[in-house]
Amino acid sequence: MVETCTTSKTPSKRVAWPHTAAIVLLLAGLAGCTYSDHAAEPAAAVQSTPAPTTSSAAKPALSGETVRDSFGNVDFYTTAAGDTLAAVAKAYKLSEAKVAEFNGLQPETPLTPGTKLRLLPSGPTRGAMGAATGDVNGIPMDYTVEADDSLAGITYRFNLTEEQLAEANKVPFAYEKGNVFFIQAGRAIRLQKNPVDSRSGSGTEVNNSFGQTVFYTTVDGDSFDSLGYKFRSTTAQILLYNPSLAADQPIPAGTKVRLIPGALKIEGAQGTFTADANGIPLTYTTAPGDTERQIVFRFGVTDLRAANRPSKGPGGAWYEFTDLPAGELAPGQTISVALDKPINNPER
């Protein structure tokens, strides 16, 4: 059984513009309006006929068909009898002017039943001026980033959240973090997930003390895609960390898959490490040229400094740097890469 883009008759909430975490936060959270299912009671009980009131009774939900993307976001709606632009816009948390703009209409234009309405821009927009491809249903599939594009512009144009864009590309985040940029001119990015087996993702996980999964034991239905979406690891990374696997072969159930470089030395993290009986890294001895960012990546650490606080005082990590702006550590230091087994330098 697989996940696919589906057609349904139940409207869903429009996905808002995403936040861009530590750099630029843009959040459009629109609260849903509520309505009473009953007209107001008469003002006076002695009246034989209820006094006129302004009713806030909810109108029936939209009944037209929808076309959804791989995340369940509604990109198209086909109108039914009685639908109006205002009602469609309200149902999907958009303004009437926006829905009209997406479809080349004027606000308050009467709708003919069977009209297929777009609920996302029809072409390039500010912050997303590049070329995109779509499937036979019009769902955006791939996009090539232009020089002045922004994360907010891309997610708006393609009706995605920042989290969904990251998942589609099997990366932990899509915003700029620590001088790591996902949005780069010329980069081809995915806008949707591939279908995966519904049985996938239920295997056993072994996590480190930061809550990051270091090992995963596969079950029937698991694939490079299902692992990539769940753990934000590309197929190339999984193959690199697990030389016994092959890209053109299925992953057998019961396979213990490594999800961090770990024993694999990488640029900026060339040192040696110790691990517990489960293979979870505990300590690391720095090598020349090592950086905090690469050590964090190699061992699935989310806060290296928290595992290496000084024994006294309010200072940050006790370990020393050879280049603080670059985050380059002095070689030969044994530091903790386990939050539950910190190393607190007694001399600092």
Image (cartoon, rainbow, N blue to C red):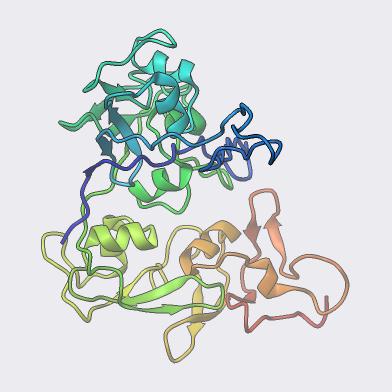
Identify the residue at horizontal 31%, vertical 40% (top origin). Answer: 190
The C terminus - image quarter: bottom right
Q: Position of residue 342 (x, y in %)?
A: 67, 81
Q: From what the image shows, is residue 317 above or below residue 38?
A: below
Quarter of the image for residue 301 reads bottom right
User: Would residue 43 be found to the left or right of residue 151 on screen?
Assistant: right
Q: From what the image shows, is residue 170 above or below residue 343?
A: above
Quarter of the image for residue 322 reads bottom right
Q: Position of residue 13 (x, y in %)?
A: 44, 40
Toward the viewer: 328 or 310?
310
Q: Position of residue 163 (x, y in %)?
A: 45, 48
Identify the residue at horizontal 55%, vertical 40% (top origin). Answer: 35
Q: From what the image shows, is residue 108 above or below residue 171?
A: above
Toward the viewer: 208 or 101?
101
Number of labels in the image equals 0
The residue positioned farthest toward the left in the image shown:
249
Toward the viewer: 141 or 37?
37
Q: Is residue 92 visible?
A: no
Q: Is residue 50 visible?
A: yes
Identify the residue at horizontal 80%, vertical 83% (top origin). Answer: 346
Quarter of the image for residue 1 reads bottom left
